[in-house]
Image (tube, rainbow, N blue to C red):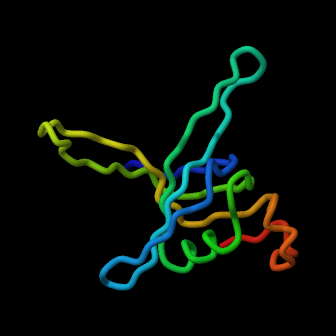
């Protein structure tokens, strides 16, 4: 038996990018800055996150660069061939839920009054 579950808390590196697939589903992507260690040994990991459907729409509407969120999801991997024909891989988290910890700049627009809003 194996388990694939990821829980990360960090800050968005930039506003989520959202698009619609040809079948009409919404998909959003963003990077999450997650710190590891402390003091002199602290480093920031940049994690690619993908969200789908209503979660993607809510994330795109409610969060922006700098917002702190918790993402719960599964690890996945994109595999493709580059221009030279080399196989490339990128690990990502496919989010099942995104909880907003703070709203940063979007709090001022009046749409976001709940500071712990899960999608």
- The correct choice, above or below, for 43 with respect to 23 in the image is above
Q: Position of residue 75 (x, y in %)?
A: 44, 50
User: In terms of depth relative to the viewer, which is nearer, 34 or 96?
Assistant: 34
Q: Position of residue 114 (x, y in %)?
A: 85, 73
Is 104 on the left or on the right of 62, as rendered? right
Residue at the outermost top position: 40
Residue at the outermost left position: 85
Is 113 on the left or on the right of 74, as rendered? right
Q: Quadrant of residue 41?
A: top right
Q: Position of residue 32 (x, y in %)?
A: 60, 48
- The correct choice, above or below, for 91 with respect to 49 in the image is above
- The correct choice, above or below, for 43 with respect to 104 in the image is above
Quarter of the image with the C terminus in it: bottom right
Q: Position of residue 106 (x, y in %)?
A: 79, 67
User: In terms of depth relative to the viewer, which is nearer, 30 or 54?
Assistant: 30
The residue sitting at 19% across, 39% down in the picture is: 87
User: In terms of depth relative to the viewer, which is nearer, 81 or 4?
Assistant: 81
The residue sitting at 81% across, 66% down in the picture is: 116
- The correct choice, above or below, for 31 with respect to 99 in the image is above
The residue sitting at 86% across, 78% down in the picture is: 110
The residue sitting at 49% across, 49% down in the picture is: 48
Is 109 on the left or on the right of 68, as rendered? right
Q: Across the whole image, how many numbered discs are drawn on residues?
A: 0
Q: Quadrant of residue 112?
A: bottom right
């Amino acid at each position: 038996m194996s388990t694939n579950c990821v829980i990360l808390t960090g800050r968005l590196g930039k506003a989520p990018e959202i698009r619609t697939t040809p079948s009409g589903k919404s998909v959003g992507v963003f990077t999450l800055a997650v710190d590891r260690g402390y003091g002199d040994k602290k480093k920031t990991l940049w994690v690619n996150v993908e969200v789908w459907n209503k979660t993607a729409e809510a994330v795109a509407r409610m969060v922006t660069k700098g917002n702190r969120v918790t993402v719960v999801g599964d690890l996945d991997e994109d595999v493709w061939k580059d221009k030279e024909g080399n196989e490339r891989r990128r690990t990502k988290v496919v989010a099942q839920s995104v909880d907003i910890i703070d709203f940063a700049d979007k709090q001022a627009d009046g749409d976001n009054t709940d500071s712990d809003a899960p999608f």
